[in-house]
Amino acid sequence: MSDKPKTNKFEILTPQGFEETGKPKKMKFVKKTECDRCGNCCSGSTPSLYKEDLDMFRSGVLSFDNTFTIRVGEIFSVPGDQETYRAFVELIKIKPKEGNEVCTFYSEDKGCAIYANRPSQCADYACWEMNDAMTGLEGKALKRKDLFGDIELLSDLIARHEELCSYERLSDELEKASAGDEAAAADIADMLDYDSFVRDYVTEKFNIPATALDLIFGKPMVGRIKEFGLRVEKEGDEFVLLPLKKEDRPNS
């Protein structure tokens, strides 16, 4: 048994040159054992929030402005992954910066602006162990009912929206429409119309800011429907469903 002390470094022989002694040059690596704030996880995606992160809303760190909801059944993609996934549980996530997937709280020069009080998923994530951030998520995930359960008006609006505009229902109607069912196509258009209507309704009737809508109702279905291979055009007050152009298909 070796008496040499264990270190976090290991060496690899490389053919890229030789030292003055004639020995092959060695490439040295440091094995990561803790977060060194490299920013890789902050740049590839944003965290899903846990129930224990509710205090971040109470303190004002998180708000309508910097969070959004992924609804059950919604199709989403992961940056760098060619596959798409269907959400098996409702998720509330921190918004990324405009035009990319970088967390809104991260900057290259300063790192994470809320690192000392970052979300639980960020604190738990250990990239050097390749742990699975999805394990146990169904029970831990913060949901809209945790935020709005005591606000009857919003709870009722969310429940009605889910009843009329669930992604499960959308998927079923799309399957029927693809088989030539015109009534199903009309139902899909009605779903998109209601999804648009309820957003305008709450902003005008209750003075809820437009920035809150992605958290209350999830992202507009008109934009998300492309994940199902369709695009939407509006003719007057009506929505028209059309096949998605090849260049606009996700991950094309």
Image (cartoon, rainbow, N blue to C red):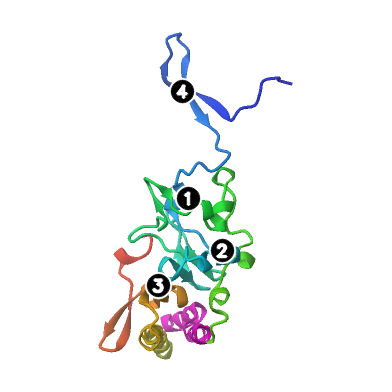
Callout 2 touching callout 3 (CB < 8 Å): no
| Residue 50 on image: x %, y % | 58, 64
Mark 1 or 2: in front is: 2
**C-alpha separation, residue under disc 3 versus residue under disc 4:** 48 Å
Rounded to the nearest angstrom, the CA distance separating label 1 from label 2 is 18 Å
Whole-angstrom CA distance, mark 2 to mark 3, is 27 Å
- Magenta span: 153-180
Q: Are marks 4 and 2 in contact (CB under 8 Å)?
A: no
Q: Amino acid at mark 4?
A: Thr
Amino acid type at mark 2: Asp
Can you give x and y, in whole percent of width and height, for residue 232 in the image? 32, 78
C-alpha gap between disc 1 and disc 3: 24 Å
Mark 3 Cα shell of 10 Å, populated few (<14), some (14-19), many (≥20)? some
Q: Which residue is mark 1?
A: 41
Q: Earlier in the sequence, mark 4 or mark 2?
A: 4
Q: Which one is closest to the eye, mark 4 or mark 2?
A: 2
In this rendering, does residue 86 appear at all?
A: no
Residue type at mark 3?
A: Arg
Give the residue at mark 3. Answer: 224
Mark 2 or 3, which is nearer the eye? 2
Residue 150: quadrant of the picture? bottom right
Q: Which mark is residue 14?
A: 4
Q: Is residue 85 magenta?
A: no
